[in-house]
């Protein structure tokens, strides 16, 4: 077991870790959005926390400590942070249960089903789609925290298969595997704070998915416990024995059952990842370069293309310590044809694939800028979410949304979503998960945050609805790797169709006939963006 660090309550990450807003970014937001005043932050110990609803004795001794309940009331979306820091959380779990075995999970689910107690499975609590949020209701609710269901069960080195309990966090997975010379290679931005079970439940993608694949490709076998049964899916290399039940579970967000353990495909740990940057003359040139690299099957582990706005911010932050050097570098780049429309692409690999990708990008007008941008990105990649809290302290809100579409639609969808933000916002975008037939688009947007939490939530909800409508109208998926959760659920039917939704509902009813498992995610069409 790796040494644990204390999580911050009402903010992203660990205590003692911070990411102050860089002065150039603050200046940009001030210039584009106007000056703002920080969102108040109240001490959690001063919140008015209602007493819990009494629970059946059959559920045992869960934690009903007020701050423990508060810490399990919301995920890590923007409005979750707003609610938690202002003390306006609308509902809390009545207890936090921490089973230490699969048998205990089974017993808890049976007892909850018999007593009509709602259950929210909890891994790392990093959902940014309302996937673990407590909704007010007339039935009691418990948070099922799997942190004690953790650790390596078995490592089959010859087959490249490792079995872990579902509550194992990312750093422990890599630490245990690394000691034996292996890696899973799954590094989402929430890597330090999220669990294997959470990755499976949300169909997560890591930042090196181009080389390793998303979690759906890495999962070989699963154990899933539900109120009305149990799935034990063996780890075969392949099988034609009916539908792939692994893929029924992956992305089910706790509605079908609780993942208790998983067997994943691991590989020998490669040499350290090397990432090099190239500046492309335009977004369109960058997209074409990315498409050619992937369709020619250049074996990269990572490809990330930032649009001009995101590139400008990155360059400003990367050069902020030396303005004289900044001017010299920008002058040299301009002589090589780099303009304000240029877009940065990062390519990462451990072998000769880098040279091949750089050669392809050169034919698209790319200018190689070396390994410095890649080193900077690697150093900060798990720290970037801390900026959200620092920005709220300065009066600015930031959130993300992501989608994916085919290459033939990507430029149109990119423009459509950017235009959807009607009120003053700053919008950045990048491609970070390319495929042979298309790629993801990951948008980051900033706006002035009202000091009133209700007004802040309402403003965010308006932007979220507009962007989601643009994504669906432009032929994009509702979610590439953040899941559906509660906030995307109203639009889920528009992607899978009425009969597709009915099929998922039938499967959920078979495993959870009393609808106690995370009932407000995935299949509940109620718009709860402002809760």
Image (cartoon, rainbow, N blue to C red):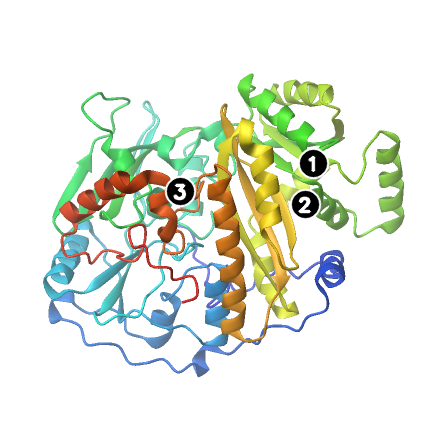
Does residue 351 appear in the picture of this structure? no
Res. 530 image quadrant: bottom left
Residue 322 drawn at (x, y percent): 84, 50
Identify the image quadrant of residue 525: bottom left
Q: Is residue 230 visible in the rendered structure shown here?
A: yes
Give the residue drawn at x 76%, y 56%: 24
> Where does residue 283 sit, x and y in percent of width and height?
68, 34
Q: Could you tell me which residue is drawn at 64 percent across and 33 percent down? A: 346
Which residue carries the number 1 mark? 344
Give the alpha-carbon distance from disc 2 to disc 3, as whole Å: 32 Å
Q: Which residue is mark 3?
A: 173
Q: Which residue lies under the disc numbered 2? A: 310
Distance between the alpha carbons at the discs numbered 1 and 2: 8 Å
Image marks 3 and 1: residues in contact by CB distance under 8 Å: no
Please tell me which of labels 3 and 1 falls first in the chain. Answer: 3
Mark 2 neighbour class, 10 Å CA radius: few under 14, some 14 to 19, many 20 or more: many
Callout 3 secondary element: helix
Q: Earlier in the sequence, mark 2 or mark 3?
A: 3
């Amino acid at each position: 077991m790796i040494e644990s660090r204390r999580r911050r309550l009402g903010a992203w990450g660990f205590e003692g870790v911070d990411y102050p807003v860089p002065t150039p970014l603050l200046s940009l937001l001030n210039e584009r959005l106007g000056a703002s005043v920080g969102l108040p932050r109240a001490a959690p110990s001063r919140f008015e926390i209602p007493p819990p609803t009494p629970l059946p004795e059959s559920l045992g001794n869960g934690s009903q400590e007020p701050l423990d309940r508060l810490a399990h009331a919301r995920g890590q979306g923007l409005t979750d942070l707003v609610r938690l820091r202002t003390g306006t959380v609308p509902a809390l779990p009545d207890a936090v249960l921490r089973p230490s075995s699969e048998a205990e999970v089974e017993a808890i689910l049976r007892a909850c089903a018999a007593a009509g107690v709602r259950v929210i499975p909890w891994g790392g609590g990093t959902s940014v789609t309302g996937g673990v949020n407590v909704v007010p209701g007339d039935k009691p609710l418990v948070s099922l925290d799997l942190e004690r269901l953790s650790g390596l069960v078995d490592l089959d080195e010859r087959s490249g298969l490792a079995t872990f309990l579902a509550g194992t966090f990312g750093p422990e997975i890599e630490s245990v595997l690394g000691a034996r010379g292996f890696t899973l290679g799954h590094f989402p931005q929430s890597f330090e704070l999220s669990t294997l079970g959470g990755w499976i439940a949300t169909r997560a993608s890591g930042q090196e998915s181009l080389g390793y694949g998303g979690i759906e490709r890495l999962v070989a076998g699963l154990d899933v416990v539900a109120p009305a049964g149990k799935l034990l899916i063996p780890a075969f290399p392949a099988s034609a024995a009916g539908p792939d039940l692994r893929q029924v579970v992956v992305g089910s967000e706790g509605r079908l059952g609780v993942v208790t353990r998983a067997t994943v495909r691991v590989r020998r740990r490669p040499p350290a990842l090397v990432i090099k940057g190239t500046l492309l003359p335009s977004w369109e040139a960058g997209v074409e370069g990315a498409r050619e690299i992937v369709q020619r099957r250049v074996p990269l582990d990572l490809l990330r293309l930032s649009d001009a706005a995101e590139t400008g911010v990155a360059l400003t932050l990367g050069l902020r310590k030396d303005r004289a050097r900044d001017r010299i570098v920008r002058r040299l780049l301009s002589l090589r044809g780099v303009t304000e429309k240029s877009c940065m692409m990062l390519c990462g690999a451990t072998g000769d694939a880098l040279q091949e990708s750089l050669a392809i990008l050169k034919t698209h007008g790319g200018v190689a800028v070396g390994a410095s941008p890649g080193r900077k990105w690697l150093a900060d990649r798990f720290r970037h979410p801390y900026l959200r809290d620092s920005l709220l302290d300065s009066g600015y809100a930031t959130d993300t949304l992501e989608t994916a579409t085919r290459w033939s639609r990507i430029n149109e969808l990119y423009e459509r979503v950017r235009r959807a933000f009607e009120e003053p916002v700053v919008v950045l975008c990048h491609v970070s998960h390319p495929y042979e037939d298309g790629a993801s688009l990951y948008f980051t947007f900033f706006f002035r945050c009202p000091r009133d939490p209700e007004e802040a939530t309402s403003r965010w909800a308006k932007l979220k609805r507009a962007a989601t409508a643009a994504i669906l109208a432009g032929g994009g998926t509702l979610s590439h790797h953040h899941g559906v959760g509660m906030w995307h659920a109203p639009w889920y039917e528009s992607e899978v169709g009425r009969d597709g939704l009915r099929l998922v509902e039938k499967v959920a009813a078979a495993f959870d006939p009393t609808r106690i498992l995370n009932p407000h995610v995935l299949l509940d069409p109620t718009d709860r963006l402002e809760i």
